[in-house]
Image: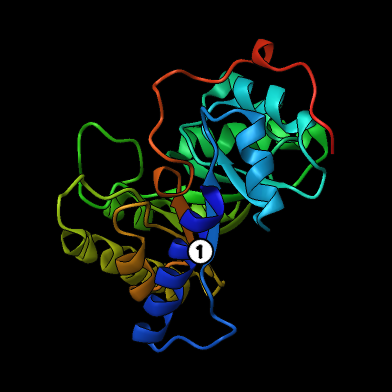
């Protein structure tokens, strides 16, 4: 049952906050990763008090979002393709996966054409995995001034996905490295980068201990996915 899974997650988040000694005003926020799950599942989450959701496919989100209450907030947490930028900008409050200077420039240009100022996070491939998108840390340090000069982007912080590991403690060094990189970039640029998006179902408690602002939790909240992506034809309408 979603409400019980949510209760367990929130208790674990609170315990992690306590262990970290973080102030009450420095609380991490939960993103319920709703990708592939139908609107009915999201509505159940809303009824339990969750209002922030994460999607990683623009077309799926474009079909799903209008079916759900307007109080929901949406973050894009996947790899954003150039040809999906224009559709994504009006849908999402925050784009997590800005993973190259090229895509940042494309977002900035299209935002200018659209008259918007998107909030974004820069994705960092902290572990240097060839299978993952993202800036290498040294690359981001070299390009941060160029990125901050893009007039339409509100760069609010960093995001990372550590290597898959059986033990959550294996992720700690990557979360710490992202926080330390953020601190260096802040000192260099003289601008705040308050948001750290890091931690998922298996390692979110460690991420909170290392300073996460946002944790992205899907399976631990919604249960194991069937592998089938929800499609708009599967539901006609949903009451608000």
Residue 170: image x %, image y %? 15, 59
Residue 89: image x %, image y %? 70, 35
Colouring method of the image: rainbow
Left/right placement of residue 206 relative to residue 150 reads left
Left/right placement of residue 167 relative to residue 132 reads left
Please determine whether, in this image, residue 154 is positioned above or below residue 91: below
Viewer-nearest residue: 84 or 61 = 61
Question: For numbered disc 1, what is the local secondary structure?
Answer: helix
- Tell me if I can see residue 192 in this picture: yes
Say which quarter of the image contains residue 228. top left
Q: State the residue position of label 1.
A: 7
Viewer-nearest residue: 234 or 59 = 234
Please determine whether, in this image, residue 223 is positioned above or below residue 216: above
Residue 239: image x %, image y %? 84, 33
- The quarter of the picture where the C terminus appears is top right
Viewer-nearest residue: 211 or 134 = 211
Say which quarter of the image contains residue 55. top right
Residue 203: image x %, image y %? 30, 58
Left/right placement of residue 195 relative to residue 99 reads right
């Amino acid at each position: 049952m979603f409400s019980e899974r949510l209760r367990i997650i929130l208790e674990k988040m609170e315990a992690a906050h306590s262990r970290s000694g973080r102030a009450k005003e420095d609380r991490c926020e939960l993103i319920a990763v709703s990708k592939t799950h139908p609107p009915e599942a999201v509505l159940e989450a809303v009824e339990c008090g969750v209002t922030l959701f994460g999607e990683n496919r623009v077309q799926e989100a474009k079909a799903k979002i209008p079916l759900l209450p307007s109080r929901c907030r949406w973050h894009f947490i996947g790899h954003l393709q150039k040809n999906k930028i224009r559709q994504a900008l009006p849908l999402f409050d925050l784009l997590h996966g800005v993973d190259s200077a090229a895509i940042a420039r494309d977002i900035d240009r299209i935002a200018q054409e659209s008259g918007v100022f998107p909030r974004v996070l820069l994705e960092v491939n902290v572990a240097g995995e060839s299978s993952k998108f993202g800036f290498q840390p040294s690359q981001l340090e070299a390009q941060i001034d160029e990125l901050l000069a893009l007039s339409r982007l509100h760069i609010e912080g960093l995001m990372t996905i550590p290597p898959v590991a059986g033990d959550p403690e294996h992720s700690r060094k990557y979360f710490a490295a992202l926080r330390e990189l953020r601190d260096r970039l802040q000192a260099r640029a003289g601008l705040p980068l308050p948001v750290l998006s890091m931690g998922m179902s298996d390692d979110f408690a460690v991420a909170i201990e290392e300073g996460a602002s946002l944790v992205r939790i899907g399976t631990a909240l919604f249960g194991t996915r069937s592998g089938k992506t929800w499609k708009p034809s599967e539901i006609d309408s949903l009451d608000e």
